[in-house]
């Protein structure tokens, strides 16, 4: 009789343990689902669980506290990012007016009789002012296109035609560096619904970057699947540097002084149009791939 009572108690303990385990499993599942929902929706609603088990309640309470911290940090980051972009936009805009005046006065001074040394000094000033003008323009454009309010339009665009127009506009830069691009593209136009002006900006930034820092060669191809590949020799780059080429404000040593925004702008615009941009290093060649 005693043995039967012990067995009965053991069975009750087992059943009670199984029930508790089931409740804990349900609570853990509810916490996991609640965490996923709150991370996706960014809501202030707290995670609730069906169990009254003290340890699971403490777990839910601890996660709610951490979620509140994450939300606060996210808001601070978003606010700071917006403020930084606005500050950069204002600064770059404020720089435009004096730089435009400087360039205008430089043109006037160039019409005056100057000594050889004065002409050389004026040329240096002009180059530096032009570089500052380009950098402030890049900063302004980057903050504009990276804002959430910016949305590219959609229209039917020929990738072939866009590349041909870009190569024509970059002709002077390519010729000055003795570069004759090797271009391969299908005869049939590859049509995509993109923003034509954004695509032109992307191509111009990539080709200009290749022209400035390549060893005098550029291979460009367009596939019928909408994949565009730009390749140039880059013996001075390593894999770590190539992995950061699309990072904003990142520049390799040979690219200074530069804003480091050209390729970042290209990647941002490409992704805004639903495409992808990747960079890789293979056999000493930098390969940038755009897919639309």
Image: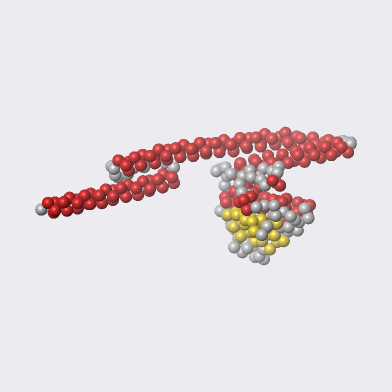
Q: Residue furthest bottom?
A: 187
Quadrant holding the C terminus: bottom right
2 sits left or right of 290 in the view: left
Q: In this rendering, does residue 157 appear at all? A: no
x and y, in percent, of residue 122 in the image: 82, 37
Q: Residue at x 58, y 36 (%)?
A: 84
Between 24 and 194, the residue placed more toward the observer is 24
Q: Residue at x 41, y 44 (%)?
A: 38
Between 69 and 145, the residue placed more toward the observer is 69
Q: Residue at x 62, y 56 (%)?
A: 280
x and y, in percent, of residue 61 in the image: 36, 39
Q: In this rendering, does residue 35 appear at all? A: yes
Between 291 and 120, the residue placed more toward the observer is 120
215 sits left or right of 119 in the view: left
The colour scheme is secondary structure
Q: Residue furthest left?
A: 1
51 sits left or right of 182 in the view: left
Work out whether 80 lies above or below 157: above
Q: State which quadrant residue 129 falls in.
A: top right
x and y, in percent, of residue 193 in the image: 58, 56
Between 83 and 49, the residue placed more toward the observer is 49
x and y, in percent, of residue 41 in the image: 43, 44
174 sits left or right of 85 in the view: right
**Circle count:** 0
Q: Residue at x 62, y 51 (%)?
A: 240
Q: State which quadrant residue 181 falls in.
A: bottom right
């Amino acid at each position: 009789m005693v043995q039967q009572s012990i067995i009965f108690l053991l069975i009750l303990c087992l059943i009670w343990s199984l029930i508790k385990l089931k409740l804990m499993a349900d609570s853990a599942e509810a916490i996991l689902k609640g965490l996923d929902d709150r991370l996706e929706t960014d809501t202030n609603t707290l995670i609730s669980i069906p169990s009254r088990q003290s340890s699971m309640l403490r777990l839910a309470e601890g996660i709610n506290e951490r979620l509140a911290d994450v939300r606060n940090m996210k808001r601070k980051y978003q606010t700071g990012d917006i403020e930084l972009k606005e500050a950069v936009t204002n600064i770059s805009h404020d720089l435009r007016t004096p730089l435009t005046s400087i360039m205008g006065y430089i043109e006037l001074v160039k019409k005056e009789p100057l000594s050889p040394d004065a002409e050389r000094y004026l040329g240096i000033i002009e180059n530096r002012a032009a570089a500052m003008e380009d950098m402030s323009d890049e900063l302004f454009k980057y903050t504009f296109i990276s804002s959430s309010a910016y949305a590219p339009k959609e229209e039917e665009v020929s990738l072939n035609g866009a590349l041909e127009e870009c190569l024509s506009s970059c002709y002077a830069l390519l010729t000055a560096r003795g570069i004759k691009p090797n271009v391969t593209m299908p005869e049939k136009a590859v049509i995509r619904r993109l923003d034509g002006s954004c695509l032109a900006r992307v191509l111009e930034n990539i080709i200009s970057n290749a022209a400035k820092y390549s060893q005098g060669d550029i291979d460009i191809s367009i596939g019928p699947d909408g994949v565009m590949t730009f390749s140039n020799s880059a013996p001075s780059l390593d894999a770590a540097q190539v992995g950061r080429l699309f990072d904003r404000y990142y520049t390799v040593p040979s690219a200074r002084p530069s804003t480091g925004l050209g390729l970042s702008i290209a990647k941002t615009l490409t992704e805004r149009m639903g495409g992808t941009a990747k960079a890789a290093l293979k056999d000493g060649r930098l390969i940038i791939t755009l897919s639309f």
